Image: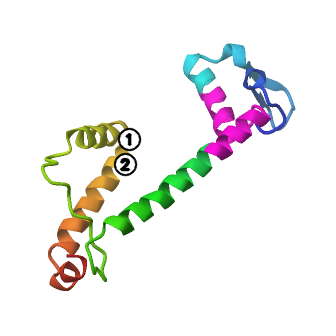
Amino acid sequence: MSGDISNPTQDRTMHVDQYSGDELADIGFADYNLLAKSMAAGIALHKGGVSVVNKILNVVFCVVFMVISFIGGIMWWKRRPRGAGRLAAPPSPEGSGFWVVGFITLATICVLFPLAGASVIAIVGIDWLVFRKVPAIKQVIN
């Protein structure tokens, strides 16, 4: 869908010979397999190209994520160590133990999305190599 239609079932791909103008292929939504149909509909929904309601829902989702980010910053600010003039993580709650659900979620995301996995490995590596090994940086964040 290139913006000229709002119904993903009207999506079609057409190949034309650049020299003669002959039609080489005309593939409509009905010719797509299940994955291609899902992708065509998903892209239209993601871009808000289906209807006004779709656009409104996309805006609501964006606002919700902005609010979550803002509230997360406020929560960190309220829980940071007293008198901290530095970047510091809030103290862990007593007896919280290892966060199993969070670890399983992160591991699943890293397996399903390899680039996310590479990013996590890079972040952990930077944390281990730089922030924990360089005394000046370690003093600032601890």
Q: Residue at x 15, y 46 (%)?
A: 98
Residue 136 position by quadrant: bottom left
Q: Secondary structure at mark 1?
A: loop
The residue at which mark 2 appears reads as: 116
Crowd rating for badge 2 (residues with CA inside 10 Å; few <14, some 14–19, many 20+): some
Q: Separation of disc 2 and disc 1 at Cα?
A: 5 Å
Asked whether disc 2 touches disc 1, contact meaning CB atoms under 8 Å apart, the reply is yes
Query: Is residue 72 or residue 33 the one in the foreground?
Result: 72
Residue 3: give x, y in percent of width and height. 80, 39
Residue 25: give x, y in percent of width and height. 75, 22
The residue at which mark 1 appears reads as: 113
Q: Is residue 131 magenta?
A: no
What is the three-letter code of the residue carrying label 2?
A: Ala
Q: Is residue 59 magenta?
A: yes
74 to 11, vertically: above or below: below
Crowd rating for badge 1 (residues with CA inside 10 Å; few <14, some 14–19, many 20+): few
Which image quarter is the N terminus in?
A: top right
Q: Secondary structure at mark 2?
A: helix
